Image (cartoon, helix red, strand yellow):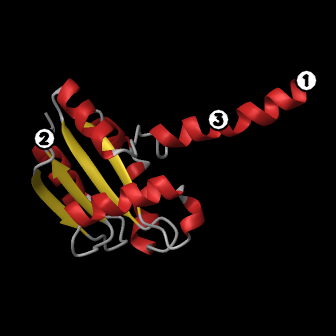
């Protein structure tokens, strides 16, 4: 009996953990949830487009930006929205893939990766910054985030 409970609840625990966070920073993966969170907390949305399994600059941003104390500190001022467009579609559920492509079509029409978009709580784009030189210099990213924190 205990073995069946573990088999049934282990996938739920994994889904619950990955559905609300990315690398411990509190990344959401649902557009409407992020907007609601921003409205409730009077913040903007930091929308991040990544190609997690193919975009080398996106992979480097994890270490050079997201894992830093500076980013962790400023991330509290945003509703964080993580939109992944991987080449290996097995990394996303069909519903998540469809959702991510809808957000991509709305806020990243050029298909640029990595891309950060600052949205107000109503979903209006305020600013954006694309790219990463992979040199460890994230001052332009942090300047954008600092400009729109509430």
Q: Crowdedness of circle 1 by 10 Å Cα count: few (<14), some, many (20+)?
A: few
For residue 26, which quarter of the picture?
Answer: top left
How far apart are labels 2 and 3 at the CA level?
A: 31 Å
SS at mark 2 in the image: loop
Residue 126 rendering spot, x and y as whole percentages: 8, 52
SS at mark 1 in the image: loop
* Mark closest to the chain's N terminus, 1 or 2: 1
Disc 1: which residue: 1
At horizontal 56% and vertical 71% (from top left) the residue drawn is 88
Q: Which mark is residue 122?
A: 2
In this rendering, the answer to whether 1 lies above or below 91 is: above
* Mark closest to the chain's N terminus, 3 or 1: 1
How far apart are labels 1 and 2 at the CA level?
A: 48 Å
At horizontal 43% and vertical 68% (from top left) the residue drawn is 51
In this rendering, the answer to whether 66 lies above or below 97 is: above
Disc 3: which residue: 12
**Location of the C terminus (image quadrant):** top left
Residue 13 rendering spot, x and y as whole percentages: 64, 34
SS at mark 3 in the image: helix
At horizontal 76% and vertical 33% (from top left) the residue drawn is 8
State left or right for residue 29 relative to residue 8.
left
For residue 109, which quarter of the picture?
Answer: bottom left
Q: Which mark is residue 34?
A: none
């Amino acid at each position: 009996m205990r073995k069946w409970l573990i088999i049934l609840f282990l996938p739920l625990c994994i889904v619950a953990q990955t559905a609300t966070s990315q690398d411990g920073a509190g990344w959401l993966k649902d557009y409407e949830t992020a907007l609601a969170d921003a409205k409730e907390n009077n913040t903007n949305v930091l929308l991040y487009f990544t190609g997690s399994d193919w975009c080398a600059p996106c992979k480097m941003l994890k270490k050079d930006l997201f894992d830093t104390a500076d980013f962790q500190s400023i991330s509290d001022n945003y509703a964080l929205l993580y939109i992944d467009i991987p080449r290996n579609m097995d990394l996303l559920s069909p519903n998540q893939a469809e959702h991510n492509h809808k957000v991509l079509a709305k806020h990243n029409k050029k298909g640029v990766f990595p891309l950060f978009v600052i949205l107000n709580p109503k979903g209006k784009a305020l600013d954006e910054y694309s790219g990463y030189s992979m040199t460890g210099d994230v001052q332009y990213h942090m300047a954008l985030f600092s400009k729109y924190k509430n």
